[in-house]
Image (cartoon, rainbow, N blue to C red):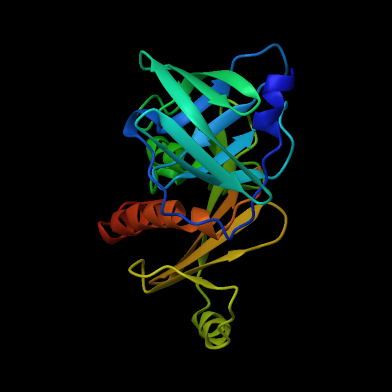
Amino acid sequence: MRRTLLWILIACGSSCSAQAAVESALIGTWQLQWQGAPIYWALREDGVYRLYGLGANPGQLGQLVATGGRFSMQSFGFADSGPYQLNGRDVWVVTGRLGPGTWKRVWTPGGASGQASTANQACSLVTAEEVARVLREPVVAAPDRRDAKACEFTAALSKFHSLVLNIYPSRRQAWDLTRSRRTPQMIEVPGVGEDAYAELDGGDHLVLRVLKGGAELRFTLTMKPAATAADTPLLGELAHAADRRLAAGVSR
């Protein structure tokens, strides 16, 4: 139990750097092998990581460097480093200052993404595989419960993360008025649609809005720990994919 505390006491804000290096074999999501409630560790290519799950405390978002059998990790008020070992492809033993922790791979980029409802034509602008890269888990897709014309993707392992895609008729005048009042909270997302920006919308939400012809695409990302500005690039990749499909005439 004491050894596990290392992995459930980490917290970080949106100020984390996104320039760390992570060995490619480590990219993906891992589950701690222990007797308690599930804890997941999601590692991104840019070094941003999340620790989450029913067995984890909230706010565990930080920055990782892991290459050549050595790791270092840093978050708000916490830092650690030490050796690690990959046993095969799917077992990762990490030894920090509180002892070793064994993690088993549960998702890797390009792996199984989950199941999507074949009746849900609203998901045609993004695929389950693309959304899985954002949520860092296999996903299940279904029509959004609040709006049958929208699409909702939910993380299949933890149920903690979700992404909802809505398409609304654009109100060009209202959009232009909002954009004329640019604030530091607006995160610019260049090269998508005619205009695009993201904002942290309170709680666990990061909302990306894309203006495209007569429509507004709205991506709402819910993460735990809460989504931050560091999550915008992956959400932007998703918007680029939807933008291309709209330009190619793909229906909703």
Which quadrant of the structure image shows residue 68?
Answer: top left
Q: Residue at x 59, y 81 (%)?
A: 183
The mark tally for this picture is 0
Q: Residue 162's x, y, as percent? A: 59, 42
Q: Residue at x 33, y 58 (%)?
A: 246
- The picture quadrant where one finds residue 24 is top left
Establish if 224 lies above or below 166.
above
**Residue 104 visible, this angle:** yes
Q: Position of residue 252 (x, y in %)?
A: 41, 51
In the image, 29 versus 17, the foreground residue is 17
Q: Which quadrant, please, contains the N terminus? A: top right
Task: Name the side, left or right, on which 198 lies relative to 118.
Answer: right
Residue 36 coordinates in the image, percent (x, y) = 73, 16
48 and 156: which one is in front? 48
Which one is in front, 102 or 234?
102
Residue 116 seen: no
The foreground one among 110 and 212 is 110
Quarter occupied by residue 185 = bottom right
Residue, x 64% and y 26% (percent of image)? 39
| Residue 25: x %, y % from top left | 34, 28
Left or right: residue 187 versus residue 112 is right
Instruction: Decide: is 3 above or below 186.
Output: above
Q: Residue at x 37, y 26 (%)?
A: 111
